[in-house]
Image: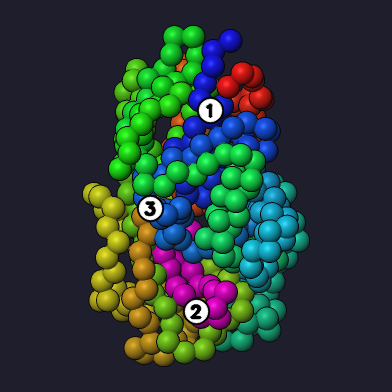
Amino acid sequence: MTKYDFDAVVVGAGAVGLACGYALARRGLMVVVLEAEGHIGQGVSSRNSEVIHGGLYYPTGSLKARLCVQGRRMLYAFLDAHGVAYKRCGKLVVATSRDEIPRLDAIWDQALANDVEGMERLTGEQARALEPGLNAHAALLSPESGVFASHDYMLALQGEIEAAGGAVVLGTPFEGAEPFAGGGFKVRAGGADPTSLTCRLLVTAPGLSAQDVAARIEGYPEDRIPKAHYGKGVYFRLTGKAPFQRLIYPPPIHGALGTHYRNDLGGQAVFGPDLEYVPAPDYSVDPARAEAFAAYIRKFWPGLPDGVLSPDYAGVRPKLHGPGEPQPDFQLRGAEDHGFEGLMALFGIESPGLTSSLAIGEEVAARLGATVQVPR
């Protein structure tokens, strides 16, 4: 039997890469996670809403629907077990006009199809009783939605991998991989101390650089690498007291869930993200966008005062579709797609990827048939 340095190499130490490493390590495999940056979670995982999604919106039978609901249930249990802070504050999806009520009806039907627990339909009066100041002609309540400390979550995942004998290696970019004829891979890693190592299983979960990483695997079919699109979203923070305790979401926009409200773990109100397609990742926030944000926010919070929104931060989602195109599912590409046994390449892991991360890790490990094989 071929001897490898590691059972599995995971590329990318964001939430999804670490969750994949955790799922493999739980099965007794020796895992190393390679991260180009100097800290974990510096890409997509550090620039999001930190929302735990209920799983309301995603098409029946999709990976997003199944893995979001499964991942959310797993996530709360993991956070409890590891002492990671969260608030199961609930979410109101609001119809800000009568014309939007049919859209709530569709979301309600989808949530039930997706087996989302505890959903309630509310009249506008009932919604305003929960959140005074809210403009709502009707609403859906998702009590299982929440917010959490995502970086502490990733630190807990890193700790689990290391406790199982694995490693998370920072400042070590993936330079390329060469599949062996008999199975397994030789992986080249750069950084201050370039090296190469061998492994039986290879998982690529690098977020925004997923396409570039796949292209660096020798023989990976070029026509099986989906085109990358970058969906930028900016956030604004409210100066003053948070107006609502629950998450507030208008109906989704095309290609995203749209600008929403959250009361973060520090008790501050944050609005965002919007959606703008950009040619390359860009994390600048134009203060002039505050005016458009304010106009959108006043649809569900008419009492927003003037001049109280401050630029906060921006994130970029790794989208697989451009403006006006249908939004695809998560892409977990195995041997049936690219031809390499032992390789799982992940593309387009945007929202609800953070909520789904533990379930994505389990799905990846299961598809790879991850079991211990010795000798290493």
Q: What residue is rendered at 61% in x and 86% in y?
A: 132
Name the outermost residue toward the right: 118
**Can residue 148 be seen here?**
yes
For marks 2 and 1, the one nearer the N-term is 1
The secondary element bearing badge 3 is classed as: loop
Relative to 36, say whether 184 is above or below: above
Per the rendering, the mark at residue 6 is 1
Q: What residue is rendered at 49% in x and 9% in y?
A: 182
Which one is in front, 196 or 151? Answer: 196
Q: Which residue is mark 3?
A: 38
Quadrant in the picture for residue 34: top left
Q: What range is drawn magenta here?
A: 257-273
Which one is in front, 349 or 251? Answer: 349
Per the rendering, the mark at residue 269 is 2
Name the outermost residue toward the front: 193
Going by the numbered disc 1, the residue's amino acid type is: Phe
Q: Assess disc 2: are there few (<14), some (14-19) or many (≥20) residues with their C-alpha within 10 Å of its C-alpha.
A: many
Q: CA distance from mark 2 to mark 3?
A: 30 Å
